[in-house]
Image: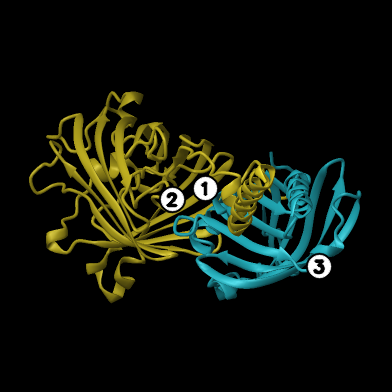
Amino acid sequence: MKKVLIFLFSLLVLKSVSAQDKFFTKAGKIVFDATTPKSPENIDGVNKTVTCVLDTKTGNIQFAVLMKAFEFERALMQEHFNENYVESNKFPKTDFKGAIANATSVNYGKEGVYPVKVKGKMTLHGITKDVEADGKLSVKGGKIQVQSNFQLTLSDFGIDIPQLVADKVAKTAKITVDCLLDPLK
Amino acid sequence: MKTCKFLLLIFCAMFVQATRVAAQDDDLLKLVGEDKPKKEFVKYAFKSPRVINGHSMEFLAPGTMDFRILHRFGLLSQGADNFFGLDQASMRLGFDFGVRRNLMFGVGRSTFKKELDGYIKFAPIMQSTGPGSFPFTVALVGGVTLNTLPWADPTAKNYFSSRLAYYFQTILGRKFSEGISIQVSPTLVHNNLAPIQSQSNDIYAVGFGGRAKVSKRMAFTWDYFYVVNGIENGINYHPLSIGVDIETGGHVFQLHVSNAAGMNERAFITETVNDWSKGEIRFGFNLSRVFQLTKGKGAK
């Protein structure tokens, strides 16, 4: 009995001491690009204050994006993005809650680049949809860099592109994610 | 035995601890804490720095230029022969520049009296939400107009100063909701030479303007000035314009009907000679296109 208890006890101690398991950032970067091939100008904006949290034990990963923080080269484009397309006054935040599908293939203890597939739910413009994306995790120097490129069909989230601007603004947006995560203390 | 019980207790405690941590996985974002609320300036109360004729509480973004073409036509009552007034067109060409989030200036020239005009608009206080919020915007406008018509009587003693007029305006505006913005603008126009003989040189007026959004890209607007002391019976009237703003990709079209033919403060406040109650109204439109002069922060 004693031996069993000591064994169980030591297991628990080991479990709770095992390493930093959560990593996060509040300065992650996401680029939103809805430029059509025929468009005379770029329709893109960048957000540099994305919140991203990764739980290495479970593979759960979550993002929170403040829509008003997307910056555009042209003020009018930023105004239209906020007022007419994503309606940021009504829906100030976009979030993604998901998990790494191949979580076991990532060895957080060993430096390297690990391709991952992430699946989860994205809530944008008040509508929640399942989203799947490929990406990679780069473990280096105690930090984890999360990168991904994927596409979103804007009409899936109730964002209409009127015929008037259809030759400039694409119906699918290319999303580029680049977040460098530090351990959460 | 005692050590057994002790170890069992520790085990239970740690087990409870472990399950508690596991439950938190559901919302990782909560672990990193909510961002502290920040002060945010309220934007896009009006789609343009002008309501229809008068200045609005809205400013151009820094580094942008608004190219404005305004048309005012003849009276609708001119009938089909004159294409309901469209045959008789008067125009103002203007350029407005955004300097800071709360500072802009503009220049323009109207065909009516061949008048040049310039103004500066500055908002010491802007409507904001969050910590340190303020419920409305206070904007101050100072402008000058210069009549460049040849003298009516070149032989008389004419003074250059007679060509000049000035106006000063305080705009108090509030964006009540996504759809409704309303503003009040007490104004003083000083005509060095009064256009109507019996009129005072100093004319006080109060503007009431607003917009009600009908859809994402369309809004209903109104722009009225109650002229306190400058109305000479039967000669001039309070200017009232009502219209629709339509926003396309890069342009804002403001279509309206009004009794005022003037397109700068001096002209539409002190010289509106048509009477709404007699149906003396005209069609007009403002066309505005914004250009980005200095590149903002962007993806590239």
Residue receiving disc 1: B66
Q: Which chain is cyan?
A: A
Q: Earlier in the sequence, mark 1 or mark 2?
A: 2
| Three-letter code, disc 1 | Asp
The amino acid beneath tag 2 is Tyr
Q: Secondary structure at mark 2?
A: loop
- Label 1 sits on a secondary structure element that is strand
Going by the image, does A34 lie left or right of A136? left
Chain that is yellow in the image: B
Give the x, y percent position of residue B139.
Answer: 36, 34
Along the line of sight, which residue is nearer the eye, A114 or A46?
A: A114
- Nearest the viewer among B33 and B137 is B33
Residue B13 left/right relative to B207: right
Mark 3, mark 2: which one is toward the viewer? 3
Tell me: B6 left or right of B201: right
Q: Which chain does the numbered disc 3 sit on?
A: A
Determine the residue positioned at 65% across, 45% down. Answer: B10
Residues at marks 1 and 2, CA–CA distance in whole angstroms: 15 Å
Q: Is residue A139 above or below residue B172?
A: below
Rendered image quadrant of residue A42: bottom right
Pointer 2 residue: B44
Residue at coordinates 72% horizontally, 71% vertically from top-left? Answer: A132
